[in-house]
Amino acid sequence: MAGSTHTVSNQPPPLSGYDVYGADRALVSAVERHLDPTLLEEVDGELSALGRSAGSAQLQEWGAQANEHPPRLRTHDRYGNRIDEVEFHPAWHRLLGKGVSAGLTAAWGRPGGHVRRAAGFVVWTQVEAGNCCPLSMTHAAVPALRADPVLAAEWEPLLTSTVYDRELRPARLKAGALLGMGMTEKQGGSDVRANATAAVPLAEDGTYALTGHKWFCSAPMSDGFLVLAQAPEGLTCFLVPRVLEDGGRNRFFLQRLKDKLGNRSNASGEVEFDGTWARRVGAEGRGVRTIIDMVAATRLDCVLGSAGLMRQAVAQAVHHCAYREAFGGKLVDQPLMRNVLADLALESEAATTLALRLAAACDDGGEQESALLRIAVPAAKYWVTKRCAPLVVEAAECLGGNGYVEESGMPRLVRESPLNSVWEGAGNVQALDVLRALRREPQALNAYLQEVGRARGADHRLDGAIKGLLTELADLEGVEARARRLAERFAVVLQGALLVRFAPPEVADAFCASRLGGDAGAAFGTLPHSLDLAAVVERAAPGV
């Protein structure tokens, strides 16, 4: 019999049973802004259905199960035959199947495909981020495969399919397929030109035997993998199928699965190639050129994934504080907590707004928008992914001790939060890519300046930040040591310009005051008290 001391009070209800998409005003506004109006009704229905699934108690439970029961490597079957398979909890397959069926690998052939997929990716990350890795790799592989029309004709319909076919069999027998990636090696890391895996041409044109070791193989349970190896003419891109045409297994030997800080539900492995059969993608010696569009797509997914994690952390924090009482009132109404929540909400909305703007540029595909992407994607990847971890940790603190307990879900977000900053090139790589775009492609800077210039005159702090950025660019002495500073300014100024144009005045005012005008401290919760912080927090509330 429960005693009076066991009566539960002053605890918020679970944040479940809601539309993750529809409750995100910044995301809904971005979709409406960037999509053709004739598509809005269809896409809104599609994303709301996904949002209701994402916000359901059932899928939240699946996400928890997939992380509580991480994948296991099975190198051999019971008879001693080498099989190199990864075994997942059923919840993982259910989630991945829903992600595929929602079109999260099908951006390339649909009107407004990148914007609608980007919004879905932000939503789906909030359920369980681990299964977004194979979705991202599969989506990003399409532009790389298009370097070979024959390969593209064979594989693209499978990669953009909305059918999740988990069985390992030849691609021609499947209704849908997933692709992983193996670029990095232990001696090189991000310096892929240091790759030592060797590719020896075989008798059949375009086929090779690979020998080497990949230190990180993303999604090693996939149907195929894009990898880099040294062919006679230099570093080249290859497609390694998991199962050969005759139904036999390719020589793809999984050595171990990585024991990662977060992303526990997803498998990342080390793989050995020993006479592994592969097909060349693109020309010999053009491996980096072949994968460059794939890298840009996965980097944008890092921005989208971080935006999703940030949004879920903010939603949890605001929801908790809307119900929790302390010191005579709701936490959300306490001036200092309101400041913290508003600051977190600003960061989250800025990330979402920037990410969807870049997705819209992918849909456009024109020269101007493509030039913008070459400088804005690495800058956004650098900055948004860096801001994710401190934001999520601060949001967890808003729940107090409850946020440090696994049942709250916040520790899983905390462990996941540094991931996107590391994957697809860590911070220094992104900052140096911004410099590379500045040096090699003047049209990239012109496109960027035209984009932020559309907001000029609307806020004096934004105008001052644009002028300050131009001053930084006028003096390129020792610029490499300042590359991080430049990447940050490129990202923050672009966020400010977008918010000034499209966000409610209270959001744009608070962002410009704190991020561009310098009227804030180093920690979250140090916004000027004179701002309309209640309106900023209300906009971020999940409304449950």
Image: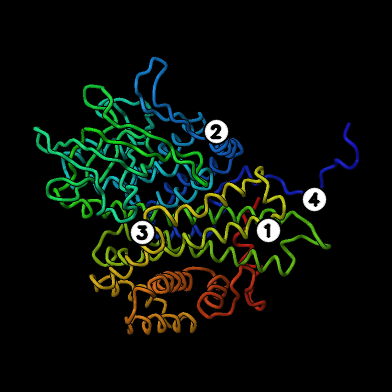
The answer to whether the residue labelled 3 contacts the one labelled 4, judged by CB atoms less than 8 Å apart, is no
Q: Which residue is mark 1?
A: 398
The answer to whether the residue labelled 4 contacts the one labelled 2, judged by CB atoms less than 8 Å apart, is no
Q: Residue 459 location, x and y as percent?
A: 49, 81
Task: Kindly identify the residue that appears in the image at 66 percent across and 79 percent down.
Answer: 530
Distance from disc 4 to disc 2, alpha carbons, whole Å, reads 32 Å
Horizontal arrangement in the rendering, residue 14 relative to residue 145 (left or right): right
Label 1 Cα neighbours within 10 Å, binned few <14 / some 14-19 / many ≥20:
many
Q: Label 3's element?
A: helix
Return the disc, 3 or 4, that comes first in the chain's sequence. 4
Task: In the rendered structure, find residue 360 and report the number of the disc placed on it.
Answer: 3
Horizontal arrangement in the rendering, residue 108 relative to residue 96 (left or right): left
The answer to whether the residue labelled 2 contacts the one labelled 1, judged by CB atoms less than 8 Å apart, is no
Q: Label 4's element?
A: loop
Q: Residue 454 location, x and y as percent?
A: 38, 76
Q: Nearer the viewer, mark 1 or mark 4?
A: 1
Please tell me whether residue 134 is drawn above or below residue 480 in the rendered image: above
Distance from disc 3 to disc 4, alpha carbons, whole Å, reads 43 Å
Q: Which residue is mark 4?
A: 10
Q: Which of these two is toward me, 190 or 542? A: 190
Q: Nearer the viewer, mark 4 or mark 2?
A: 2
Task: In the rendered structure, find residue 69 and report the number of the disc placed on it.
Answer: 2
Name which residue type carries label 1: Cys
Label 4 Cα neighbours within 10 Å, binned few <14 / some 14-19 / many ≥20:
few
The answer to whether the residue labelled 1 contacts the one labelled 3, judged by CB atoms less than 8 Å apart, is no
Task: Kindly identify the residue that appears in the image at 75 percent across and 66 percent down.
Answer: 334
Return the disc, 2 or 3, that comes first in the chain's sequence. 2
Name which residue type carries label 3: Ala
Distance from disc 2 to disc 3, alpha carbons, whole Å, reads 37 Å
